[in-house]
Image (cartoon, rainbow, N blue to C red):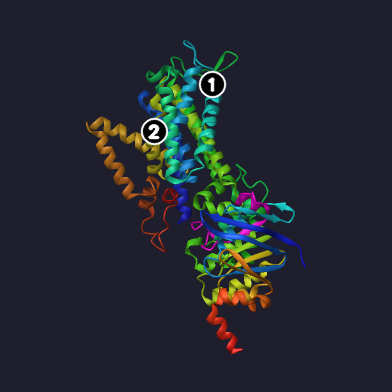
Amino acid sequence: MAHVSKLWRRGAFALVIAMAIALPIFAPTYYVQFAAKAMLMGMLALSLNLVVGYGGLVSLCHAAFFGLAGYVLGLMTPESAGASMWLSLPAAVLVAGAAAAVIGALSLRTRGIYFIMVTLAFGEMLFYLFHDTKIGGGSDGLYIYVKPQLAIGGATLLDLENNHAFYYLALALLAGATLLVRELVRSPFGRALCAARDNERRALSLGFPVFRVRLTAFVISGMIAGLAGYLSAAQFGFVAPQMLGWHLSATVLVMVVLGGVGTVLGPIVGAFALIGLEEALKASFEHWKLIKGLIIVALVFLAPGGIQQLAALSRAAPVERKGPPAAPQSTEALSNV
Amino acid sequence: MSEILLKATALGKQYGGLRAVSGVSIDVHRDEVHAVIGPNGAGKSTLINLLSGDVCVTCGAVMMGENDITALAPNRRAMAGVGRSYQKTTIFQNATVFENVRLAAQAHGGRPLRLFGAASRDGNVNARAEAAIEAAGLTHCFDTVARFMSHGEQRQLEIAMVLATEPRVILLDEPLAGMGHAEAQRMIALIRGLKDGRAVLLVEHDMDAVFALADRLTVMADGQTIASGSPEYVRSHPAVRAAYLGHDHAAAEGEAA
């Protein structure tokens, strides 16, 4: 039975990948751009899930890493030319990682609700840094008129002004980030991170340097968030302080919870579900935000383990009635907050 | 006398105006079980927490051989060879027996925080985990999720985890608490095996177990040591009889004798 469900899952996964690759061939430009945007949100949710789902650390400042990297691209882009991607991409990711190192080093000394509050405060500090000063155009933000250039010796490798090229770059980087996170959570490091989430005292008394493990995860997560922010700024050609605000951090958290905390792919599913839902509701209703809220509440009640759990239930409901119900690991990640 | 593996000198812990532990010196030798007994609130658990680093000392020093470990965090002490169990079972409830013990073995294997390569495929770590599970007598529930096990088995699992960290010093905080008779007998046999090549400090309320296991005894009351020595010496110590058994009990036993 388990074998069949594994095959089923693999087949579904292969189908999704094939569709993602084929999408630009048959879909109109609008939907190609829309899918690229959703993939970048998925990448941000993926990064947040590394700390929320596997670390049990609910961060409310991930938009800050996302936005900071976007601003790095904005500030490195000359008035009438594109920034070199070879320089600006590593710079953006490193700045996001450095910010995560500083914020993490301070906030990881707190636990639970205090951690949420401290990360929120740091996120807001960075928001106001860009909102209330002249850096990056203040509250008006900054336009990026020309997309970053990926070239070797004058020969352009990839023209990002082309929607299809940008889409495939985003897809490839999302796949890379997903594989990275998958590898991390299966590694000894990932197991130590989960151990600290499940029982910090025991993890310490076994000899794991819990603070260092968490900080490492936080920095890696911040760098992936930065990668998403860089690409997002490149896609829209515009950065504004809202990109760093807590509103985005909270939205991404909803994506993570919606998709299923503690699974690698769940947050990406959650990002597509939330953005897709918004798009569908926007087109049909005037008060779409109200309906969106109700749907999210219903989903959380029906499937506390996320959309992935909903899918699993609909397939295997009659069989899995034996023995005590195994609470999804994901809900427990949040319960020690 | 065999080598001293852990030695604490004049340990003190003060919480505001309360002296939980004051001026306690204790040492644990290789191949011995050193039991610490005393009434509730005597400071036994605090003493274990001071030795393991879970609680910071107010004064005094903890030495492991020649190394001063007083300032080390609990994880550093664990790496230095101190393993411990808690009064309240402290394990990874949602993981299997094997994963619980594998994590313990991983923490003390080569490159315990490697970022790449599946953790489950480290043959050396897996072998050490399997050996510890066998030593703790849990081979029959290798793949059982910890929270579905009985209380006694969970305590055995905690011992297996401690064993997998290959400790030189083991601190046990009331390992028999809440156990039925059969479970307790199994645990006593297990603890007796632990002292081979290691030093074991045992805090326990079950006097039958204490006298069955202890090579030496220290009695605490009100955060201080009131007697320390062989079980026979402690059993007949008047201050111990007064503090621990109560004056009436001591008098009654005196009459019976």
Percent position of residue A79, x then y? 47, 11
Residue nearer the viewer, A203 or B41 = B41
Residue nearer the viewer, B215 or A238 = B215
Judging from the image, mark 2 belongs to the subunit labelled A
Query: Tag 2 or tag 1, which sits nearer the N-term?
Result: 1
- Is residue A176 found left or right of B123 in the rendered image? left
Judging from the image, mark 1 belongs to the subunit labelled A
- Is residue A302 found left or right of B142 in the rendered image? left
Residue A193 visible here: yes
From the image, state whether disc 1 or disc 2 is nearer to you: 2
Q: Quadrant of the N terminus of chain A?
A: bottom left
Percent position of residue A44, x then y? 45, 34
Stretch of the chain drawn in magenta: B69-96
Percent position of residue A163, x then y? 43, 22
* Inter-mark Cα distance, 1 to 2: 25 Å
Tell me if residue A112 comes above or below residue B7 in the rendering.
above
Q: Looking at this view, name the residue that lies furthest to the front.
A: B17
Q: Would you identify the image quadrant in which residue B203 lies? A: bottom right
Residue A246's disc number: 2
Percent position of residue A97, x then y? 54, 31
Q: At 54% from the left edge and 46% from the top edge, which residue is drawn?
A: A193
From the image, tell me which residue sits under label 1. Answer: A88
